[in-house]
Amino acid sequence: MLSVSEAEAIILNLVQPLDKERDIEVVDLLTASHRILASPITSQLDFPHWDNSAMDGYAVRYEDVQDASESQPVSLQIVEEIPAGYQPKYTIQQGQAARILTGSVMPPGADTVVMQEATRREENRVLILATPKPQEFVRHRASYYQAGTELLSKGIILNAPDISVLAAAQCTKLPVFRKPVVAILSTGNELVTPDKALQPGQIVDSNQYALAELVRESGAEPLMLGIIKDEPDALEEAIAHAITNADIVLSSGGVSVGDYDYVEQVIESLGGEIHIRAVAMRPGKPLTVATFRLSHGRVYFGLPGNPASALVTFWRFVQPAIKKLSGLAKGWKPKFVKARSRNEIRTDGKRETYLWGETFLNSEGFYEFQLATGGHSSANLINLAQTNSLAVLPVGQTLIPAGGEVEILKQ
Ligand SMILES: Nc1nc2c(c(=O)[nH]1)N[C@H]1C(S)=C(S)[C@@H](COP(=O)(O)OP(=O)(O)OC[C@H]3O[C@@H](n4cnc5c(N)ncnc54)[C@H](O)[C@@H]3O)O[C@H]1N2
Ligand code: MOO
Ligand SMILES: [Mg+2]
């Protein structure tokens, strides 16, 4: 059976990112947050746009004030006041200064700013009481960014600081990758929608809801295809529709060895190539991964039906696949951190094991993991509520004592 990391490598290799020409849309800056940039951004503006002052004070020529001190102040004539938004009119000559405020344009001739606290004002003159450093408190044009060079690179998720940079750079229309479409279908004769009264033997199709939410959280658009009966014809029709209308297809259920588990059979009858049939993990062993020749680069995930298995396989494999597909340049794989386990954790060590719980920062600033109480059966979805992470125990590890270190996959 494939290991989890082998399965991850196969999946990431199958996924092809969206096309940087075909799969883009242009969005307004105000709606660009969390979207992925589809091409690099450059600006025609230098940052700062001009030499300006970092302090409220006086713009001077360094050579005039290089010997200034409290006991031997240098007296300069103030020729101009330069508030924000004002273009200086005078060139500072020997023995002159300009009153300047933070962010204001440096006047020609001046090369240094003396902060107000190191001066004393005497009507239209200023006494400089200390020697500044050459060019002190001047923010030089283009020292933060040079016009025409790359400002933001392709494949990043735009965050609030990025939006601020783009606004300042007057980039208000942005090319971003379209959101990938992820089709979701649930298989099972026993499944009903949550609004239906349950007949004996029926259960609610909770996976459809869980997966739709996880798809949205991953930055993609769910295409909800509902509940499909455990019948090969119905399944074939649904899967054929899904693979032609979505970038990724998720089904849940029907991938084990039961009499009504038709997913693999239907994939093959549709000409699909199955790359993964099982993974050495718990929960999630019967994961099925396939591709179809007709829909290049589209990956089919047959997730196991048990609710915890569907969630765990989504976090471990589908989320990275969506990230790569979305055009994100890096950081596709899940993030693992180390935490101290509050509880003793035991497993049989036969497969890589994922146990859900809550990870939080303790008062010393370290991560602690609290295992969800109740059974860790893959059919138990009740104790998944309010969990935010999975403890990962590698093959062969059967025990983590209370207080021991555990690896955590954090959401
Ligand atoms: N003889 C064997 N039996 C099973 C094996 C095995 O290796 N040999 N593997 C077990 C494991 S592990 C899992 S996981 C399940 C996977 O089963 P399937 O993917 O075939 O799923 P189903 O049989 O359709 O359903 C399993 C279980 O999950 C419930 N379910 C299904 N879909 C949903 C949904 N959309 N929302 C909520 N719950 C759902 C379904 O009612 C069943 O209870 O197989 C084991 N068996
Ligand atoms: O993976 Mo099954 O996924 O152990 O319940
Ligand atoms: Mg089954």
Image (cartoon, rainbow, N blue to C red):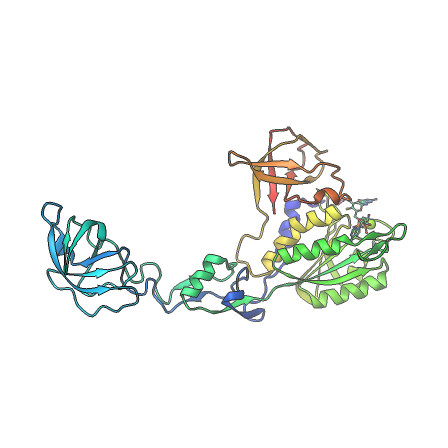
**Closest to the observer: 361 or 410?**
361
Establish if 146 lies above or below 284: below
User: Residue 77, how many percent across, how many down?
Assistant: 12, 61
User: Residue 12, how many percent across, how many down?
Assistant: 62, 54
**Closest to the observer: 361 or 276?**
361
Judge from the rendering whether residue 390 lies leftward or rightward of residue 205; answer left or right.
left
- Regarding residue 275, the answer to whether it shows in the image is no
How many numbered callouts? Answer: 0
Judge from the rendering whether residue 186 lies leftward or rightward of residue 334; answer left or right.
right
User: Residue 213, how many percent across, how many down?
Assistant: 67, 56
The residue positioned farthest toward the front in the image shown: 123
The residue positioned farthest toward the left in the image shown: 72
On-image quarter of the N terminus: top right
User: Residue 279, how many percent across, how many down?
Assistant: 71, 46
The residue positioned farthest toward the right in the image shown: 200
Judge from the rendering whether residue 340 lies leftward or rightward of residue 284; answer left or right.
left
Ligand 2 placement by image quarter: top right
Residue plotted at (72% across, 42% down) = 383
Establish if 367 lies above or below 72: above
Residue plotted at (79% across, 54% down) = 205
**Closest to the observer: 259 or 133?**
133
Question: Residue 125 appears in which quarter of the rendering?
Answer: bottom left
- Regarding residue 29, the answer to whether it shows in the image is yes
